[in-house]
């Protein structure tokens, strides 16, 4: 979704963009999973395809987003071989945590961040819930790091200042190789004025680290407060149990183009995440539409999370517009294209 938006923005401003993508939904069989695991070391298919594409198109830069599991670090080496500069936007903590979200068993987990080898991830089977998969990822990453594969990345882009500082501290990225650039938001908004309504909104994946069940527990005990939940995910069965409460509306999947009225009408967007989020797009979209955001304090204690959510919700309800509204730093499309063009121009080849 974000890559498509970036592609359109770049093309609108005169850049030629060639997409090279892989879809994890194509991993279906046990044999597929085995191949993916061993391809983390060296992916012959990616090496061939990317090499042919680079030699055909002769790009100035290759800008990567999420490369795991189907593209992998092989891509960096192919770019280096072809003397093409590499830009990597960071969307998770995969360079320090095989699971990618620094989260395990109900709270933030930082056992692997300072390890040369991700042995705790293997012990707990963090990568896709499998010790075998965790071993393959950890071993492949260990080899690539010791080979210097990641030095092929010329610039890291971070949409979150916290994440930039985290990577600089624990992954050793120098300030000269990293830049803080918040995501841009380009929404189609009706000029018609839309009045706020008396309900709160959650938009996101229905999964443990997102804190959705804790949020539902809070609203279950506040029958005068209404919550609308939009999203899909592995906890959808647990979430659907809360349909029996009249003040909780489980809406399932809603197309992104139809989300704008929900943001505009909601009294506030609630982000109850239990892990270190990296610029969730819902927060950028809500901020762009001037919708307040209520964020829970990160904690590994289930009760602390619910207490924090309830307290902030009640405070917001009591103080309404005078309540300090959480905001996230966002870029306008014009600001984003200006910075990204400056980054690209450092590596533009002379024709």
Image (spheres, rainbow, N blue to C red):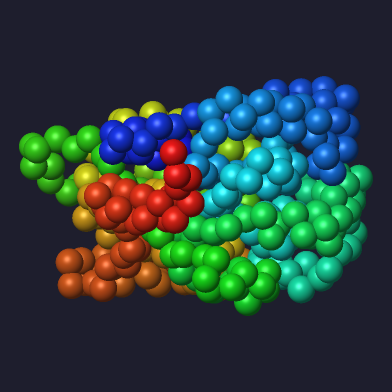
165 left or right, relative to 263: right
Residue 279 visible? The answer is no
Residue 157 visible? The answer is yes
Please, which residue is most extreme toward the left here? 192
* Nearer to us in this view, 239 or 276: 276
The residue at 58%/38% (across/down) is 233
The residue at 27%/60% (across/down) is 292
Asked which quadrant contains residue 66, the reply is top right
Q: How far across and down, in percent of the image, does residue 255 sit? A: 39, 29
Q: How far across and down, in percent of the image, does residue 341 sit? A: 36, 50
Please, which residue is most extreme toward the bottom here? 169
Q: How far across and down, in percent of the image, does residue 143 sit? A: 86, 55
State how many labels appear. Answer: 0
* Nearer to us in this view, 247 or 345: 345
Q: How far across and down, in percent of the image, does residue 55 sit? A: 62, 29
Please, which residue is most extreme toward the front here? 351
99 left or right, relative to 295: right
* Nearer to us in this view, 294 or 318: 294
Task: Tell me if residue 92 comes above or below residue 37 in the rendering.
Answer: below
Indicate the quadrant containing the N terminus: top left, top right, bottom left or bottom right. Answer: top left
The residue at 40%/32% (across/down) is 16
Asked which quadrant contains residue 194, the reply is top left
The residue at 50%/42% (across/down) is 60
Indicate the quadrant containing the C terminus: top left, top right, bottom left or bottom right. Answer: top left
300 left or right, relative to 219: right
């Amino acid at each position: 979704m974000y890559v498509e938006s970036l592609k359109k923005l770049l093309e609108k401003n005169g850049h030629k963009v060639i997409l090279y993508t892989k879809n994890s939904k194509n991993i279906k069989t046990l044999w597929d999973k085995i191949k993916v695991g061993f391809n983390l070391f060296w992916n012959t298919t990616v090496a061939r395809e990317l090499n042919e594409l680079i030699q055909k198109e002769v790009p100035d830069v290759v800008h990567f987003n999420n490369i795991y599991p189907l593209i992998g670090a092989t891509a960096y080496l192919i770019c280096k071989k072809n003397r093409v500069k590499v830009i990597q936007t960071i969307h998770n903590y995969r360079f320090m945590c095989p699971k990618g979200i620094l989260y395990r068993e109900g709270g933030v987990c930082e056992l692997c961040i300072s390890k040369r080898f991700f042995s705790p991830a293997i012990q707990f089977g963090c990568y896709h819930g499998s010790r075998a998969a965790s071993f393959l990822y950890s071993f492949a990453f260990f080899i690539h790091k010791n080979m210097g594969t990641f030095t092929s990345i010329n610039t890291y882009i971070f949409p979150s200042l916290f994440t930039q500082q985290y990577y600089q501290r624990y992954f050793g990225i120098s300030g000269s190789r990293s830049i803080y650039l918040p995501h841009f938001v380009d929404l189609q908004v009706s000029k018609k004025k839309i009045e706020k309504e008396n309900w709160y909104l959650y938009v996101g994946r229905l999964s443990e680290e997102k804190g959705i069940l804790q949020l539902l527990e809070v609203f279950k005990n506040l029958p005068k407060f209404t919550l609308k939940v939009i999203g899909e995910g592995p906890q959808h069965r647990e979430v659907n149990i809360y349909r029996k409460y009249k003040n909780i509306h489980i809406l399932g999947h809603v197309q992104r183009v139809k989300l704008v009225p929900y943001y505009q009408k909601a009294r506030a967007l609630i982000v109850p995440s239990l892990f270190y989020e990296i610029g969730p797009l819902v927060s950028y979209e809500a901020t762009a539409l001037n919708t307040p955001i209520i964020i829970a304090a990160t904690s590994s204690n289930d009760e602390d999370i619910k207490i924090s959510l309830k307290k902030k919700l009640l405070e917001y309800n009591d103080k309404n517009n005078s309540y300090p509204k959480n905001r996230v730093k966002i870029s306008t499309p014009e600001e984003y294209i200006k910075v990204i063009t400056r980054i690209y121009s450092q590596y533009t080849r002379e024709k």
